[in-house]
């Protein structure tokens, strides 16, 4: 009676930054749950690899090779690819970080992080919502971070964008709820991705992280993907405006 509501059969999900790490894990989990995918990323090779993995589950995958900052181009290509097909789920996952200390942040770093993490996420969400409004609703999921909720040692601009995404999630949920559009966010702690690869090689840093993580380990990508499936599914239909922290309990402590 209840378990079928967690399935995604017949749904179409769009995932940005879909070629590695969190984005790839979410795309694969959606395919395993029965959804078809639109995969958006900057590299053709990565898109083909994710497409192959998605289609190994019996799902179909469209691909758009584009930087998310070119959101107008993405919207145009998406319209051409899917035609009148309904978008059920949109995941704003693409993001970058420079771990500069605040005194060392450059204007170039500032603009690139703001443009990719926040500006593009808003305008892509806006584009998705316009389509969802015409089709009685949908789900938008923003990938934010623990860094948007508690203070970390470096990466101030990244933290600002992730905090902005948390507030954006609340405001969009408020505005778009009347259209049947649910807007939620997922806030990961440390998972093995290209953004964390180098810093997780630092044993002292990892020890410090784990000292503030009740579960005493780094997360596994499949543990994050499950929350994305839940928020995309009908099982979460009465949830909107929320940020689900998948953090091993880290936000109990702060940093």
Image (tube, rainbow, N blue to C red):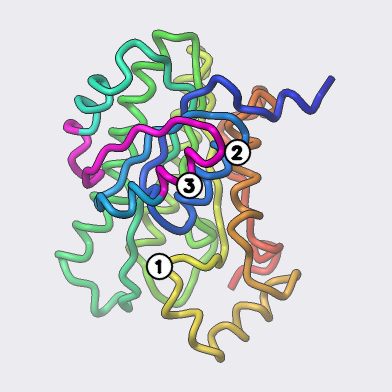
User: Mark 3 falls on what kind of element?
Assistant: helix
Query: Which is more toward the observer, 193 or 231?
Result: 193
Query: Which is more toward the observer, 229 or 33?
Result: 33
Instruction: Tell how many labels.
Output: 3
Q: Earlier in the sequence, mark 2 or mark 3?
A: 2
Q: Label 2, on which residue?
A: 32
Using the numbered discs, state the Cα–Cα distance from disc 2 to disc 3 in whole angstroms.
10 Å
Q: Quadrant of the C terminus?
A: bottom right
Q: Which mark is residue 226?
A: none
Q: Nearer the viewer, mark 3 or mark 1?
A: 3
Question: In the image, what residue occupies the spot 15% across and 65% down?
Answer: 107
Q: Earlier in the sequence, mark 3 or mark 1?
A: 3
* Residue 51 falls within the magenta-colored stretch: yes
Snapshot quadrant of residue 64: top left
Instruction: Name the side, left or right, on which 148 lies relative to 40.
Output: right
Question: In the image, what residue occupies the spot 48% across and 29% down?
Answer: 36
Q: Which mark is residue 195?
A: 1
User: Mark 2 falls on what kind of element?
Assistant: helix
Snapshot quadrant of residue 51: top left
Q: Label 3, on which residue?
A: 53
Residue 40 placement (x, y as % from top left) = 32, 41
Residue 213 placement (x, y as % from top left) = 69, 72
Question: In the image, what residue occupies the spot 55% across and 65% down?
Answer: 191
Question: In the image, what residue occupies the spot 27% across and 42% down?
Answer: 120
Using the numbered discs, state the Cα–Cα distance from disc 1 to disc 2 in whole angstroms.
25 Å
Q: Earlier in the sequence, mark 1 or mark 2?
A: 2
**Residues in magenta, as a range:** 50-73
């Amino acid at each position: 009676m209840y378990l079928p509501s967690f399935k995604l059969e017949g749904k179409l999900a769009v995932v940005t930054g879909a070629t590695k790490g969190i984005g790839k894990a979410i795309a694969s989990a959606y395919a395993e749950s029965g959804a078809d995918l639109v995969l958006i990323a900057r590299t053709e090779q990565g898109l083909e690899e994710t497409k192959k993995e998605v289609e190994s589950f019996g799902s179909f995958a469209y691909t758009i090779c584009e930087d998310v900052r070119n959101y107008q181009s993405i919207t145009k290509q998406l319209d051409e690819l899917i035609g009148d097909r309904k978008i059920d789920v949109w995941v704003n996952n693409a993001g970058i970080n420079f771990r500069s200390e605040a005194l060392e942040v450059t204007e170039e770093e500032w603009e690139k992080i703001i443009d990719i993490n926040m500006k593009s996420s808003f305008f892509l969400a806006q584009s998705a919502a316009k389509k969802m409004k015409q089709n009685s609703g949908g789900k938008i999921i923003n990938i934010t971070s623990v860094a948007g909720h508690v203070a970390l040692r470096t990466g101030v601009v990244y933290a600002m964008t992730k905090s902005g995404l948390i507030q954006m999630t609340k405001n969009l949920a408020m505005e778009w709820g009347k259209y049947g559009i649910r807007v939620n966010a997922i806030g990961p702690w440390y998972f093995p991705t290209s953004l964390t690869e180098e810093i997780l090689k630092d044993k002292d840093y990892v020890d410090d992280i784990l000292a503030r993580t009740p579960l005493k380990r780094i997360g596994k990508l499949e543990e994050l993907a499950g929350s994305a499936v839940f928020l995309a599914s009908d099982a979460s239909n009465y949830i909107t405006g929320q940020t689900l922290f998948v953090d091993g309990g880290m936000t109990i402590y702060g940093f």
